Amino acid sequence: MKILVVGGGGREHAIVEAVSRSKHADKIYCVPGNAGIAELAECAPIGVMEFDRIAAFAKEKEVDLVICSQDDPLCAGIVDRLEEEGLRVFGTRQNAAIIEGSKSFSKNLMKKYGIPTAAYEVFTEADKAKEYLKSYNKFPVVLKADGLALGKGVLICNSLEEALAGVDEIMLDKKFGTAGNEMVIEEFMTGREVSVLAFVDGHNYKLMASSQDHKRAGDGDTGLNTGGMGTFSPSPFYTEEIDRVANETIYRKTVDAMAAEGRPFKGVLYFGLMMTAEGPKVVEYNTRFGDPETQVVLVRMKTDIIDVMNAVIDERLDEIDLEFEDKAAVCVVLASGGYPEHYEKGKIISGLDKFAEADDCYCFHAGTAFDAQGRVVTSGGRVLGITAKGDDLSAARKRAYEATEWVDFDGKYMRHDIGKAIEERV
Ligand code: AMP
Ligand code: GLY
């Protein structure tokens, strides 16, 4: 098969790596890709929102399958558009991608179908939101812009003052753009967070191995929210008992709810869960593989990813036995100094060749490009996702941190406590 992957981040590098292990993959293309993906796939400089150009490229190359796992194009209808052109696509159609694209949609869905989540109210007017906050008077409180905001449209406010300013930021200053035309105010939950990804074919679902992200920029979960600074898989906090409960109260109900709403969900459904004292609750849904969760989940997946994706498209996921290695994986993100705020680009990256001979170590490129001389340089906030597998989480963590020393670039920044919670568990 000829396969086209849409995107150019660390998640897409991990997807391309998994596709490259498939017995079905003869040729892989990627748009726009990045310097690391270019080692496994032929990349073309087409943006993820350029649906017409992507369709034309896929047809010209006679691609058998297009894979898209990025929120913006999915919510804007890339799957519907490419299917109209007769292409075979793995990804979520627009009418189901709304589960990520609108927080008010997903919150209302959970309320309607009795899926456990934080209590909330939806607002379309800043004044009403402020009035509500004044009577709410329980802090911290969580404010969320309704739409897509690069994972950054969530404010956790510790006082009424902060919350009122937050409403202004989201609804009046439009800090997150039109994502802030509507907002959700919700109860603050406490507990461990776990990410659970599932393949879903509209009716059947198969869970992937659990993982955990680290969203804050600094050690000890301090600093600003980022796209994700590192992950580990599996999560020891995701126990068999929690899995049993979540299957019953969350996963089955969500998949059935979407079908009942006439929005059958196909693709990858990401459950962001909080392990609260009252049991697992949904923090958020995403309509795609997580980034950087994918970098620790797919490296452990034994089942051929193209077999799974074909089964999703053909609605026969029940026939698939989804298997994961009994190993652990840890991903440490190397970012550009200053991320998630201002940072510089174009820094030369050295030491990348060391990964070629290292077993169970991966260097997933997120923000990299080639400069005019063909050297690999930084081109984004999150630059590389250094990933390693080991017999257990401690071994994987040690190996991943060793491998972070192999590469260097000006301003290289990372957290030093990815997966540390595992060691503190005992
Ligand atoms: P989201 O984009 O909805 O995943 O939110 C980003 C992060 O904010 C989550 O990963 C949580 O750490 C935090 N968060 C979101 N909603 C809540 C909540 N209701 N209670 C506590 N933390 C939350
Ligand atoms: N790692 C969180 C996300 O992909 O949204």
Image (spheres, grey):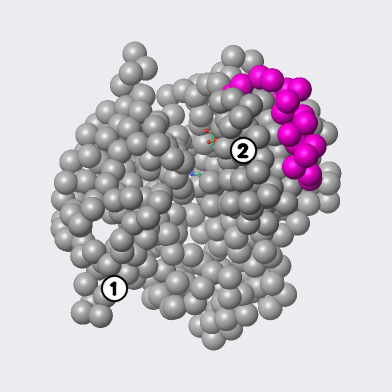
State whether label 1 is within 8 Å of ligand 2: no
Is 93 within the magenta? Answer: no
Given the image, on which type of amino acid does mark 1 rest? Phe
What is the total number of numbered labels drawn onto the structure image? 2
Q: Is residue 250 visible?
A: no
Q: Which residue is mark 1?
A: 370
Q: Quadrant of residue 141?
A: top right
**Residue 218 appears left or right of 179:** left
Disc number at residue 115? none
Looking at the rendered structure, the kind of residue marked 2 is Ala
* Horizontal side, residue 273 vs residue 409: left or right: right
Residue at the location (63% across, 60% down)? Answer: 74
Q: Quadrant of ligand 1?
A: top right
Point 66% across, 25% down: residue: 187
Asked whether 358 or 74 is in front, the reply is 74
Label 2, residues with CA under 10 Å away: few <14, some 14-19, many ≥20: some
Point 51% across, 31% down: residue? 194
Identify the mark at residue 165; answer none if there is no mark: 2
Q: Nearer the viewer, residue 373 or 131?
A: 131
Q: Quadrant of residue 383?
A: bottom left
**Residue at (20%, 45%) from the top-left corner?**
403
Q: Residues within 10 Å of mark 1 (few under 14, many from 20)?
A: some
Give the structural element (helix, strand or loop) at label 2.
helix
> Which span is picked out in magenta?
116-140
